[in-house]
Amino acid sequence: MKSILKYGLVLLLWQAGEIKAAITITNIAVGYGHSFFLKSDGALWGMGRNTLGELGDGTSISTNRPKQLVSSNVVAMACGSDHSLFLKSDGSLWVCGYNQYGQLGDGTFNMTNRLEQIVPAGVVAINAGNAHSLFLKSGGSLWGMGLNSDGELGDGTFNNTNRPEQLVASGVTAFSGGSFHTLFLKSDGSLWGMGANAYGQLGDGTLAATNYPEQIVPSNVVAVACGSAHSLFLKTNGSLWAMGDNENGQLGDGTLTNASVPEQIVASNVVAIAAGFSHSLFLKSDGSLWVMGFNGSSQLGDGTAVESHTPKQIIAKEVTAVVSQTSHNLLLKSDGSLWGMGYNVDGQLGDGFPNYNSMIPEQILPSPRPVLTNTISFKTNLQFSTVCRFGGTFNLLASTNLTQPLSQWLSVATNIINNRTNNLFSATLTNAANASASQKFYILRSQ
């Protein structure tokens, strides 16, 4: 009786703690192998690859579960392939990670695994391409640094720069960096581009690169997103337009033909867009999430690895934001929960299961509550097999028909996961003695 009361209390306290610590996530960003999210208190959290210092925690140790990196005052973040940018509430710009092309803007070409300040004030927005960085100042001026081999900085040269330089003097309202190209919007709704154009990603009707900004669309553009070599933009009437590389159907027009001029993909009701390396995502006004393009890492989240050449709905409602850059995606739902799908070899989804891609959207935060599993599928003198719906390190909290004290049970660790299918994880629970059949378990993932 004493044992039952003790562990009943543990479960109750854990549940109360979840309610008290309800998570409000306000912003998300992803790079090649790492991801960030921002909480409403200004705390910055990250997960995934950190071998080049892209998490900025002072180490080169990757993490497959969310880790707090900055406790307060962060208002925005952006990821390149292997570097990161952060904007604080005082308008200061901070950076970390890989710096071979000067993308950190600190005057060197040295990587750093700690946050360093580049601009002390006046920054209002940030974005990053593969190896170049972009930021907007309060006067509407656009600045950049890093890789410029294809003219993606638009400064009239093809020279890399390791210091911020002004690219456009005023009037810029939004911008996005691809692998080797850049697009930006002006306050009059015009769309401008510069950089690589071999696939038509600038949408100017040619395949010629340009190292200075050129106008692509004269008006009515409200949002832009760059993939590796394709581009998306959104007009004021809610229509979605695309151009560039279409080898995997990422333009969503039903073909595999590249487009060197913008083509309309969806006529109305689109409210947000995101572009991965070779796939695309968009949200409609009803909260539905739609995808198209390459799916080799299951980044489309449809439960397959088959690419789609036309838009496919994968979530019907309640999605409020989505981000992508390469082969994984993060999304937010209206209840404040964080979800991920796609490539996860470095733990960038934060689900505790590196090396296992997520074929369908899975909830990352808040952590799922303890799950009462199905009846055990088999037992031996020492082991029971069961199914868990999330990754990490597990501990048994309570059960039915338990014949031994909970203290005799060992924790369930990720290294004994033996199967994963559509986010159902088969794990083994080990007991110090025999137990009765038809046993059920509450399992808690530890943080």
Image (spheres, rainbow, N blue to C red):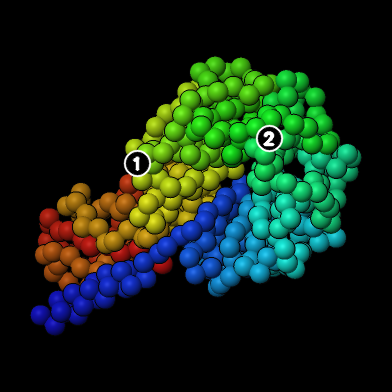
In this view, the residue farthest toward the bottom is 2
The residue where tag 2 is placed is 191
Percent across and percent down for residue 34 are 58, 53
The residue where tag 1 is placed is 317
User: Label 1 is placed on what type of residue?
Assistant: Lys
Percent across and percent down for residue 335 are 35, 55
Is 32 drawn above or below residue 231 in the view shown?
below
User: Label 2 is placed on what type of residue?
Assistant: Leu
Neighbour tally class for label 1: few under 14, some 14-19, many 20 plus, Cα within 10 Å: some
Which residue is depicted at the point 53% across and 30% down? 240
Q: Quadrant of residue 431?
A: bottom left
Neighbour tally class for label 2: few under 14, some 14-19, many 20 plus, Cα within 10 Å: many
Q: Nearer the viewer, residue 133 or 154?
A: 154
Q: Nearer the viewer, mark 2 or mark 1?
A: 2
Which residue is depicted at the point 63% across and 53% down? 78
Instruction: Tell me the quadrant of the picture where the N terminus can be found.
Output: bottom left
Which residue is depicted at the point 63% across and 24% down? 262
Which residue is depicted at the point 25% across and 53% down? 386
Percent across and percent down for residue 181 are 73, 37
Q: Secondary structure at mark 2?
A: strand
Q: In this image, 134 relative to 210: left or right?
A: left
Q: Nearer the viewer, residue 404 or 102?
A: 102
Instruction: Tell me the quadrant of the picture where the C terminus can be found.
Output: bottom left
Assess whether mark 1 and mark 2 are in contact (beta carbons under 8 angstroms): no
Is 332 drawn above or below residue 5 in the view shown?
above
> Can residue 119 be seen in the rendering of this structure?
yes
Find the distance from the CA under tag 2 to the CA under tag 1: 30 Å
For residue 105, which numbered disc appears in the image? none
